[in-house]
Amino acid sequence: AQTVTQSQPEMSVQEAETVTLSCTYDTSESDYYLFWYKQPPSRQMILVIRQEAYKQQNATENRFSVNFQKAAKSFSLKISDSQLGDAAMYFCAYRSEISGGGADGLTFGKGTHLIIQP
Amino acid sequence: DAGVTQSPTHLIKTRGQQVTLRCSPISGHKSVSWYQQVLGQGPQFIFQYYEKEERGRGNFPDRFSARQFPNYSSELNVNALLLGDSALYLCASSVRTGYEQYFGPGTRLTVT
């Protein structure tokens, strides 16, 4: 079974600064997907960024980028120019590459609470 | 376009009771997944349905069951409620299995 570990329960950053959230995972699979989700106090889980394991290039979405190290099984999220609206719980998630109509349930870490200091 | 909707928003039940939670996927989405998120934890996968068939199940007891209707909406049922079932229940829909999952706002279940 796959596991996802987020070792930082809480992180704090000054507005406009850069912060990096850590995530490691354990799997024996070679094809999979990794995600970062944001969950604000409204509880709605919002997809921030995704990474396909077969792609060597790190994904980028505006101020959000990842550092994907497949051999090290590491998948960190970098948020540049932090904004007050970035304050939320951030969850790292893993999904297998499915075949044959199987399920693709996500495996989540425990989350990192990101605080933005004005 | 409407996103994933869930009802009710909040629910309070007593131990031993049964509860039904509802989810309507995004229009055009045929797959629905259910997750349980206990306070302070990440969501845990419960079920996935695609084209009205169960495609996967997480490590949850048989007290948890679900179904998907012809219009692709879904219900999650939990029997013989325990205090430990208190959680936020999230529904996510996708076009089909293997595609991006979009989450609803969740149903907060409190068991007393």
Image (spheres, coloured by chain):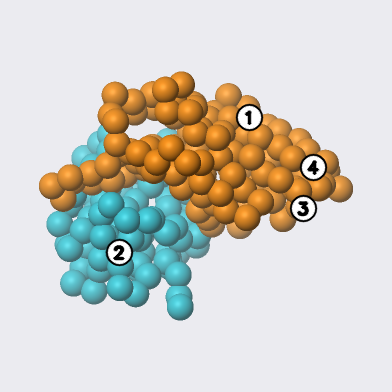
Q: Nearer the viewer, mark 4 or mark 2?
A: 4
Name the kind of residue labelled 1 in the image.
Answer: Pro
| Distance CA(mark 4)–CA(mark 3) | 11 Å
Q: Chain of mark 1?
A: A
Q: What residue lies at 78% left-to-right and 38% top-to-bottom?
A: A13
* Label 2 CA crowd tier, 10 Å (few <14, some 14–19, many 20+): some
* Label 3 CA crowd tier, 10 Å (few <14, some 14–19, many 20+): few
Q: Earlier in the sequence, mark 1 or mark 3?
A: 1
Q: Which residue is mark 2?
A: B95
Chain A as rendered: colour = orange
In terms of depth relative to the viewer, which is nearer, B61 or A107? A107
Q: Chain of mark 2?
A: B
Q: What residue lies at 45% left-to-right and 75% top-to-bottom?
A: B2
Name the kind of residue labelled 2 in the image.
Answer: Val
Quarter of the figure that contains the N terminus of chain B? bottom left
Q: Which residue is mark 4?
A: A17
